[in-house]
Image (spheres, rainbow, N blue to C red):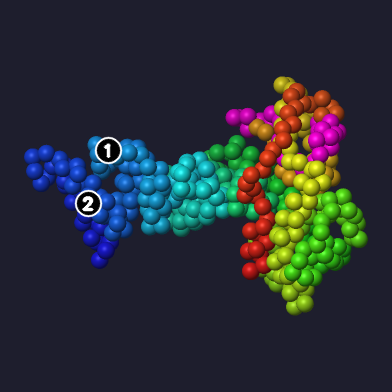
Amino acid sequence: SKKLGGDVHFQLAKMYENGQFGDEPDLDSAFFHVQTAADAGSRQAHIVMAKLYSGVARDVLRDFKVDEDPDMAFNHWLEAAKAGDHPAMNMVAQYYEGLLSAPGVEVSWKSAVKWYQQLVDDHYNMDETEIDEEEEFEMHKILAKMAAMYETGGTGLSKSARKACELYNDAAAAAEEHMKAKLASKYYEKAAELDGEAEEEESTVSEMTSGSGLLDVMDDLSIGNSSAPGTPKASQQTSSGWSEAALINMIDKFVVVLKETSLAAGLGASGEEQEKLETFLHSYHDYKHAFDDMLLAEGLQTWALTCLDKVGSAVRDDLRQGHIRYVKAKAGNVKMAGVLKNDRGDPIGSLFVLNFSKEDAESFMESDPYAVAGLYDKVTLTEWDVEWNAMTVHAAADKAAEA
């Protein structure tokens, strides 16, 4: 078989390297046979080739030299991962997460989570003997890493507080198994914090699909009724009472959650409502493009606002809930917001991505409860020319419409 042929070539490579066919090692022949073994699907050969092109130590081709080639390394790691090698799965996930880089590999948290999850699933399906024999993985760290990616979302991965909450709970349980009580406690705290946010996400879906929700306010935007999107106006109040900016933000959340469900099962919609939702999702991404163009036309710019805390200030925790309420009230213009942390994981400031005029962006910063209380030591407002944005719902809307 092809696999057997690959194993034979791999053994020949080791024999040539050890000089068993002559007085001296024949490294060129060894390389040829490792390469041939990889072409035949040998997992071991793919791992050796991946390490060779990464410039790291290896058990075979120890002294053979080639120019480092990150793309070639990634391709061999990927083939080894597909063959079920756990360290290779971990390496591939790190490339997609952005911890390792190769010119031909685009960062994709969605793909990173896929490989981390495969590693976790395989690990927990192994018996204790197999686990002892394989490279030791700290599952709690991998689970927490996935949780953190779902917590913020990005590069193809939809934000999901519920999924992040579940993964932090799993990470805590895994940490407890390894007698890491302090770390487990930290993960449980994160899960509890996200549970409330998850309930809010789920409430958003309910709100969007009942009462003055999505099925009732879609007509406010004049989309879903024809192939052409409506004409957006950022400050205009819709008949449902939402400003269009706030409504767009709400629909964004809805689409992200909808992506994780089927239209029928997730919403329990009737046939007529089902058809209307599908039509809406097909046209929404066009409307969103028009809305973004409108923001520019109305003089709204994208700003990065960085606020660094005063050393030793103790007001952040006391004012956190008021700060969160303030930011959520500006949801139509606050595109992203989060806490900056140091190497120990302690908060050291806040970072925002805003759509405002410069005057309104400055006003937003000055009225933040943290700023009013004097928490910030240094504040920087920088215009951000967004040339590429992976955290868009356009692809999510397309995929949800096809579900």
**Is label 2 in a helix, a strand or a loop?**
helix
In the rendered structure, which segment of residues is drawn in magenta?
Answer: 342-370
Instruction: Give the label on residue 33, or none.
Output: 2
Instruction: Give the label on residue 65, or none.
Output: 1
In the picture, which quadrant includes the C terminus? bottom right
Q: Is residue 171 visible?
A: no
In the picture, which quadrant includes the N terminus? bottom left
Q: Quadrant of residue 364?
A: top right
Crowdedness near tag 2: few (<14), some (14–19) or many (≥20) residues, C-alpha within 10 Å = many
What amino acid does circle 2 point to?
Answer: His
Left/right placement of residue 132 relative to residue 114 reads left
Does label 1 or label 2 sit earlier along the sequence? Answer: 2
Where 401 sits versus 330, above or below? below
Q: Which sits in the foreground, 395 or 226?
A: 226
Where 211 sits versus 110, above or below? below
- Residue 358 covered by magenta stretch: yes
What amino acid does circle 1 point to?
Answer: Lys
- Give coordinates of residue 107: x percent, y percent: 53, 47
- Give coordinates of residue 239: x percent, y percent: 91, 61
Left/right placement of residue 42 relative to residue 170 reads left
- Residue 190 covered by magenta stretch: no
